[in-house]
């Protein structure tokens, strides 16, 4: 996990922010970048808080599910 690699080299809060920025960037979606960074922050925070990635995975699944539902319903998001 990218977050753990960053945590080995920097303070946890900085590692969280850097990891979220990387998460947003690797998706290569400029318009969705802010939302991707936000979900990266949430998932990273969950992983840091719990010391496990289970809840972070479910948060990611929920975000993806919501995104797909909005696309299928053709609801404008911005």
Image (tube, helix red, strand yellow):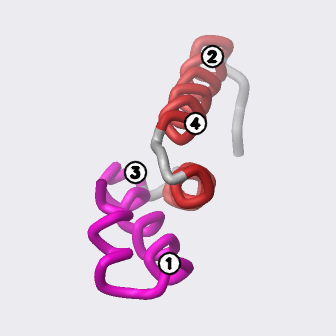
Disc 1 element? helix
Residue 14 image offset from top left, x and y in percent: 49, 83
- At mark 3, the secondary structure is loop
The residue wearing badge 3 is 29
Q: Label 4, label 3: how many angstroms apart (C-alpha)?
A: 24 Å
x, y (%) of residue 44? 52, 57
Among all residues in the image, which is located at the extreme top?
72
* Label placed on residue 55: 4
Residue at 42% x, 75% y: name it. Answer: 18
27 relative to 78 in the view: left or right = left
Residue 68 shown left or right of residue 5 in the figure: right
Vertical placement of residue 17 versus 49, above or below: below
Q: Residue at x 43, y 58 (%)?
A: 24
Callout 4 secondary element: helix
Which numbered marker is on residue 69?
A: 2
Instruction: Indicate which disc, 2 or 3, sits on the residue closer to the N terminus.
Output: 3
Front-lying residue, 76 or 50: 50
> CA gap, disc 1 to disc 4?
18 Å
Q: What is the C-alpha distance between the residues marked 2 and 3? A: 18 Å
> Which-is-in-front pick, marks 2 and 1?
1
Q: In the displayed structure, would residue 37 be above or below residue 74?
A: below
Which mark lies nearer to you, 2 or 4? 4
Tag 2–tag 1 contact (CB < 8 Å): no
Residue annotated with mark 1 = 12
Q: In the drawing, what numbered circle is on residue 21?
A: none
Magenta segment main secondary structure: helix
* Residue at 47 percent of width and 64 percent of height: 20
Magenta segment range? 1-29
């Amino acid at each position: 996990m990218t977050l753990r690699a960053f945590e080995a080299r920097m303070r946890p809060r900085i590692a969280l922010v850097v990891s979220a920025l990387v998460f947003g960037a690797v998706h290569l979606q400029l318009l969705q970048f802010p939302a991707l960074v936000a979900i990266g922050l949430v998932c990273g925070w969950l992983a840091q808080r719990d010391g496990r990635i289970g809840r972070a995975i479910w948060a990611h699944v929920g975000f993806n599910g919501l995104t797909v539902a909005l696309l299928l319903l053709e609801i404008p998001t911005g």
